Image (cartoon, rainbow, N blue to C red):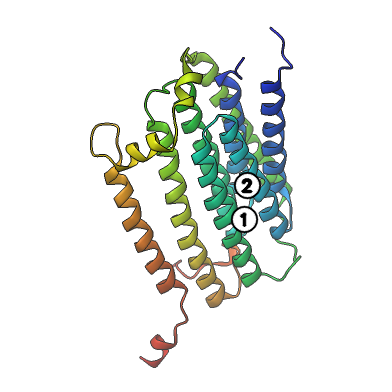
């Protein structure tokens, strides 16, 4: 007997909002990036589970999940290089203290 | 119907690992510990994909997320922060407000989702067992309907652009100083 689809959906909803909570609370740029990774993974679970249980004839959700992982890797690499550059200029990666673009 | 079947027990173990370590990852004050907890979360999600009998995406999750992104994050943490340093002191009101926002979001999503009524496919298990490496390769490398050659090539261009962009952004700026 399979686990019902609703259980997976509840799991990914909870993980998504854990990520949202971290995204709001964290001040550190790397912490925010990690929360974004949690959110992306929660969404990815949804894609794969819907493909597996609702439409298993085609691999649409599966491929979408695969491409989400690829884009997430690219996004993380660029974000980390931006963070390192910010740290080199300002010696700080807290979002509250980065104000150079203001005014 | 019995509740404690082997499938349910494995699922709840994986879900507990994902949720507990996910919560620890956003609440801990030490950023390196948060990266370690994130690693556990990603590992358990790969286990969830294996549990769904999708081996290829589990392998991709392990090699790209657990192997690549977490290592990248740890490198970045060690480059920009002193080890074991406390990250931040967030005010209690901000924590409470964001927790309330998150709980409201969970409730809204769950009400919508449980009202939807998912119709699981009867033959899902047999059809999912057919997803072998050959089927995935055909799907990635074809140009027909439900085949994904164009996104595959776009992803390769995206990765190239992102490599060049990261190198350009992160390199030292000696040249600009000479100008």
Which residue lies at the image location 56% right of the left edge and 26% below the top edge? A9
Lateral position of residue B24 relative to residue B121, left or right: right
Q: Is mark 2 on a helix, strand or loop?
A: helix
Q: In this view, does B28 lie above or below A17?
A: below
**Residue A31 found in image quarter:** bottom right
- Which residue appears farthest toward the bottom when viewing the image? B178
Lateral position of residue B94 relative to residue A16, left or right: right
Which of the two residues, B157 or B113, is positioned nearer the viewer here?
B157
Which of the two residues, A84 or A93, is positioned nearer the viewer here?
A84
Q: Which mark is residue A1?
A: none
User: Which x, y percent locates residue A24?
Assistant: 59, 47
Of all chains, the one bearing label 2 is A
User: Which x, y percent locates residue B91?
Assistant: 71, 51
Quarter of the figure that contains the N terminus of chain B: top right
Q: Which residue is the site of mark 2? A: A22
The reply to whether the C-beta atoms of the residues labelled 2 and 1 are less than 8 Å apart is yes
Q: Is mark 1 on a helix, strand or loop?
A: helix
- Which residue appears farthest toward the left when viewing the image? B144
Of all chains, the one bearing label 1 is A
Q: Which residue is the site of mark 1? A: A31
Which residue lies at the image location 70% right of the left edge and 49% below the top edge? B37
Q: In this view, does B165 lie above or below B108?
A: below
Quarter of the figure that contains the C terminus of chain B: bottom left
Which residue lies at the image location 38% right of the left edge and 23% below the top edge? A57
Camera sees residue B88: no
Q: In this view, does B158 lie above or below B84?
A: above
Q: In this view, does B41 lie above or below B79?
A: above
Measured Cα–Cα span from mark 2 to mark 1: 8 Å
Is disc 1 on the same chain as disc 2? yes
Which residue lies at the image location 68% right of the left edge and 33% below the top edge? B14
């Amino acid at each position: 007997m399979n686990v019902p689809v609703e259980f997976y959906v509840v799991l990914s909803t909870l993980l998504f909002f854990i990520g949202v909570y971290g995204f709001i609370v964290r001040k550190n740029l790397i912490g925010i990036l990690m929360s974004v990774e949690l959110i992306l993974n929660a969404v990815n679970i949804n894609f794969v589970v819907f493909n597996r249980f609702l439409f298993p004839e085609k691999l649409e959700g599966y491929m979408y999940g695969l491409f989400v992982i690829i884009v997430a890797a690219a996004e993380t690499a660029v974000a980390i290089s931006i963070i390192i550059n910010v740290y080199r200029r300002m010696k700080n990666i807290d979002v509250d203290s980065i104000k150079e673009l203001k005014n | 119907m019995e509740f404690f079947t082997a499938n349910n027990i494995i699922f709840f173990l994986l879900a507990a690992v994902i949720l507990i370590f996910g919560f620890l990852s956003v609440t801990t004050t030490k950023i390196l510990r948060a990266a370690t907890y994130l690693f556990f979360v990603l590992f358990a999600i790969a286990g969830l994909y294996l549990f769904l009998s999708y081996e290829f995406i589990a392998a991709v999750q392990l090699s790209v997320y657990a192997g690549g992104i977490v290592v990248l994050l740890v490198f970045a943490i060690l480059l920009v922060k002193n080890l074991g340093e406390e990250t931040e002191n967030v005010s209690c009101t901000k924590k409470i407000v964001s927790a309330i926002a998150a709980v409201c979001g969970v409730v809204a999503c769950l009400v919508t989702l449980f009202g939807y009524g998912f119709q699981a496919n009867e033959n899902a298990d047999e059809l999912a067992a057919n997803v072998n490496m050959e089927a995935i390769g055909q799907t990635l490398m074809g140009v027909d309907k439900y085949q994904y050659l164009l996104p595959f090539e776009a992803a390769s261009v995206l990765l190239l652009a992102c490599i060049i962009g990261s190198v350009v952004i992160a390199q030292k700026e000696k040249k600009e100083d000479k100008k």
